[in-house]
Image: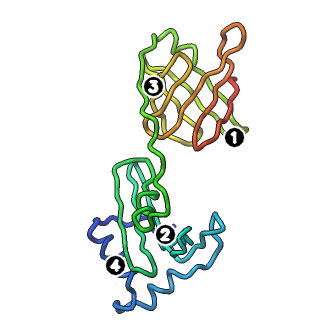
Amino acid sequence: AGAGALRSTVNDMLRFVRANADPTSQPLGRTLSMTHAGRRPGPAPTVTIGLAWHRLAAPSGRTLVWHNGGTGGYRSFAGFDEASRLGVVVIANSAVSVDDIGLHLLDASIPLAPIPKQRVAISLSPDVLQRYVGTYDLAPTFSIVITRVGDALFAQATGQPRFPLFAESEVDFFLRAVDAQVTFTKDASGAVTGLVLHQGGQNLPGRRR
């Protein structure tokens, strides 16, 4: 497989963005410009895909050329305004995307993402937490396994790392690693029968095995 990333510094990223924002001033200017051209449709009507770049037709009429990256609790964004040649680099030691920050800095007509609700964790007894331990199927090939270690509850989705869950109430929990919440559901007798995963604006139910 080809290289998935290159280790670098923010100053190197700024130099790279500067070269792409003003390719006519670079020895490889023609080559850089060729990478900006849209070659395939993107995930939305306003987006096309170039060579390692996304082209976004912003609501203001500007064309923004950008890309992002992320691994192991870090996120990055690099982009520029094709007309004004304004360039932006955003890096963060966070698992949360910084795309909205980079795009907003390039074009104020693109709003920042809403700030997540500040959540406060409460303590529940190990006996209460133990009731939720089990496997919950959200799809034929996607499940969430809930485990308990002492007075802590953990969730691990198919193909993903295990993350701690924090209680907001006896049935409502949240994750700090990602913007996601879990609500456990019970039947009339009080037995735990399932959960609902709240993430990305979706509410995905899962049935307990």
Q: Is residue 199 left or right of residue 12?
A: right
- Please tell me which of labels 1 and 3 falls first in the chain: 1
Q: Which residue is mark 2?
A: 2
**Image disc number at residue 18:** 4
CA gap between label 2 and label 3 equals: 39 Å
**Image disc number at residue 181:** none
**Do tag 2 and tag 1 residues touch (Cβ < 8 Å)?**
no
Circle 4: residue type: Arg
The crowding category of the residue bearing disc 1, from other C-alpha atoms within 10 Å (few below 14, some 14 to 19, many at least 20), is few
- Please tell me which of labels 2 and 3 falls first in the chain: 2
Q: Quadrant of residue 164?
A: top left
- Please tell me which of labels 2 and 1 falls first in the chain: 2
Q: Position of residue 80 (x, y in %)?
A: 42, 73
CA gap between label 2 and label 4 equals: 25 Å
Circle 1: residue type: Thr
Q: Position of residue 110 (x, y in %)?
A: 49, 61
Circle 2: residue type: Gly
- Please tell me which of labels 1 and 4 falls first in the chain: 4
Which color mode does the image show? rainbow
The crowding category of the residue bearing disc 2, from other C-alpha atoms within 10 Å (few below 14, some 14 to 19, many at least 20), is few
Q: Position of residue 72 (x, y in %)?
A: 40, 49
Q: Which residue is mark 3?
A: 166
The one nearer the camera, 120 or 178, is 120
Q: Dot 2 lies on which element?
A: loop
